[in-house]
Amino acid sequence: MTVKNIKTSLALTKKHLEKIAKSKRTKHRDILQVIKYSEGNKATVTDSCRALFIKYKHENFGDSFDNIHSLRPMDVTKYPDVDRVVPNDAAVPNKLKIEHSKIKEMLTTLREWKKLKIENMMISFEKGSDSTQCYLESKKSYIEENESTIKLYLGSFEETNNNNITFNTEYFLNIIQFVKDTKEDTVLKFGSHFNPIVFENELADKFDYQYILCPIRVY
C-alpha cells in the first residue's frame, strides 16, 4: 500500500507567503523580501499594501527570517512592526461569512477580470429595507463605455452606510486564491472605505490566518 505524501501546513501556505515577499512593491525594498517566523508558530509577510499572518497549530520553529533573495545581506532589525496594521474591531465592525463554494465563484470572476486587464475592482453595497447587500464589482472606469458592469453577489448584513471600497484586482485575486487553498469558509471584515479589510478563518484544525488588504483611494 502506497502512503501519500501529505504536505505540512507550512508547505501548503509557503507559496502564498512568498508571493507577497516577491511582489512588485518589494522590488526596491530588500527588507520586505523576507518571511518572518516568530513566537514558535507564526509567519508574517507584507509588501506595504497587504499583509498575511498565519499561526500554525502543528508547527514549531525558532525565530528567523526567510530571505527570498538569500544572497543579499540585510539588516533584519529594520523589519517593520507589521502587527500595528491589523485593524481593531472598531475599524472593521461589519462581518460577512463567505462559504467556500462562493470563494470558487469569486475566483472565476476575478480571473476573468484579470484577463480583461481590469486593474481595479471594488466591494460595493446596495441598501435594502432591512439589510445591505454586498457585491464584488468591476470598476466602470476600466471597462469600455458600451460594456455593462459585472457584479457578483457575496451576501447580506445589517443596515449600514458603507461607501464602495476599491482594490487592486490582482491583489484581491491573490487573497481569494489563498482562501480557496485553505478549503474552508472565510469571514470578511470591513468598515470605512479608507480602512483595510480583513479575511480570516473562524474554526481551523491546521492554522489561523489574517489576510489584510489596504484599499485604493479614489478621488
Image (cartoon, rainbow, N blue to C red):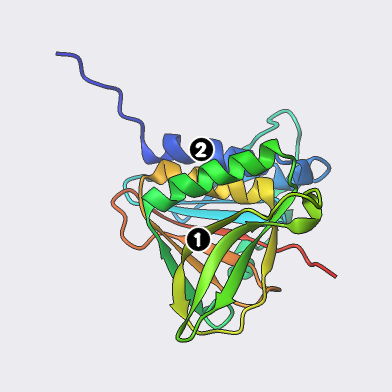
The amino acid beneath tag 2 is Lys
Decide: marks 1, 2 in contact (CB < 8 A)?
no
Instruction: In the displayed orientation, state which residue is furthest to the front.
Output: 146
Tell me what residue is drawn at x 38 percent, y 40 percent. 9
Q: Position of residue 141 (x, y in %)?
A: 81, 56
Q: Is residue 80 above or below residue 96?
A: above
Q: Which residue is mark 1?
A: 153
Q: Helix or strand or loop: what does disc 1 sit on?
A: strand
Q: Is residue 102 above or below residue 70?
A: below
Instruction: Tell me if mark 2 has few (under 14), some (14-19) or many (20+) residues whose alpha carbon lies within 10 angstroms of its own.
Output: few
Labelled disc at residue 178: none
Quadrant of the rendering where the N terminus is positioned: top left
Left or right side of 163 for 201: left
Labelled disc at residue 14: 2
- Asked whether 47 or 167 is in front, the reply is 167
The amino acid beneath tag 1 is Tyr
